[in-house]
């Protein structure tokens, strides 16, 4: 697919709804969190208006080119670059909460479109950071997987589930050092032959301290990925 950002969004709106979402959309269409217009959880105009971060190192906030992790931080993380669509506030925060707590699965499509709109035209194997299985059971889906699969479709990139979660530790409210300790062995690579010596884009909904993303990226690198970049809808 050609990397035309507006066309990616329009195609997403037309083709990427689930059957259930399509039916619900007819009966009770979504209203945009930003302007109230019917048709999507967030419309294209409001996606374009979301407050974003400038190109910088995600760990220390030092200005860098193309969202690259700075030289000083590269020895501490396996994430080469981190891209995001918005700051975790206002409309962006509402979208995440609707996806995670109100079962508005269409929000994953809009979040993926927001990411696709901001990502460079690059080639990756797309995967996601798996959510703890108990949260998946409660919601009925893994929100990061929904975003990653849709993003891959919109960009014409291959998507595979490449990580298994081995712990169920709850991270919310924990300090970064505690999160890092908890996540040290939280993931296991699966089907490493699919990404050996290849570039991987690791997708999640929100980054807070970065401990979860870093643990997932390290697992992929240790299993043979050439480079791991990350894409998150929002930065907290």
Image: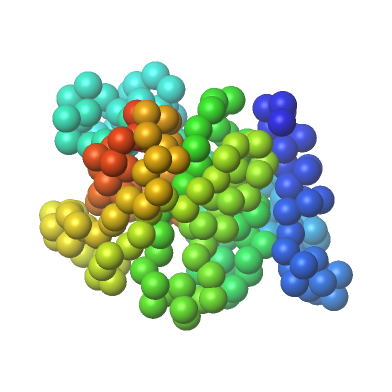
Q: Position of residue 69 (x, y in %)?
A: 30, 28
- Locate residue 205 relative to residue 153 in the image: left or right: left
Q: Residue at x 79, y 58 (%)?
A: 39
Q: Quadrant of the N terminus?
A: top right
Q: Position of residue 174 (x, y in %)?
A: 21, 64
- Locate residue 10 relative to residue 77 in the image: left or right: right
User: Is 211 or 126 nearer to us in this picture?
Assistant: 126
Q: Residue at x 81, y 51 (%)?
A: 14
Q: Residue at x 66, y 36 (%)?
A: 156
User: Is 143 or 62 nearer to us in this picture?
Assistant: 143
- The residue lying furthest to the front in this view is 193
Residue 30 vertical placement versus 154 (above, below): below
User: Is 48 or 28 nearer to us in this picture?
Assistant: 28
- The residue lying furthest to the right in this view is 26
Q: Does any portion of residue 86 appear in the rendered image?
A: no
Q: Residue at x 31, y 35 (%)?
A: 224
User: Is 179 or 32 nearer to us in this picture?
Assistant: 179
């Amino acid at each position: 697919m050609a990397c035309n950002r507006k066309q990616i969004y329009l195609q997403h709106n037309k083709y990427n709804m689930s059957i259930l979402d399509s039916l619900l959309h007819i009966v009770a269409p979504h209203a945009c969190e930003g302007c109230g217009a019917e048709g999507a959880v967030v419309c294209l105009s409001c996606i374009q208006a979301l407050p974003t971060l400038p190109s910088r190192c995600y760990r220390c906030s030092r200005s860098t080119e193309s969202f690259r992790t700075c030289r000083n931080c590269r020895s501490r993380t396996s994430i080469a670059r981190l891209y995001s669509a918005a700051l975790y506030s206002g409309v962006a925060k509402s979208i995440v909460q609707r996806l995670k707590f109100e079962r508005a699965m269409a929000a994953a499509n809009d979040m993926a479109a927001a990411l696709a709109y901001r990502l460079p035209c690059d080639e990756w194997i797309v995967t996601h950071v798996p959510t703890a299985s108990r949260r998946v059971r409660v919601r009925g889906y893994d929100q990061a997987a929904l975003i990653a699969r849709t993003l891959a479709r919109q960009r014409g990139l291959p998507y595979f589930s490449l990580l298994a979660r081995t712990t169920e530790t709850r991270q919310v409210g924990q300090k970064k050092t505690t999160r890092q300790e908890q996540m040290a062995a939280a993931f296991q690579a699966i089907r490493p032959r699919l990404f050996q010596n290849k570039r991987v884009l690791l997708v999640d909904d929100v980054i807070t301290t970065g401990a979860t993303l870093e643990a997932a990226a390290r697992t992929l690198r240790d299993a043979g990925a050439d480079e791991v970049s990350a894409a998150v809808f929002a930065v907290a």
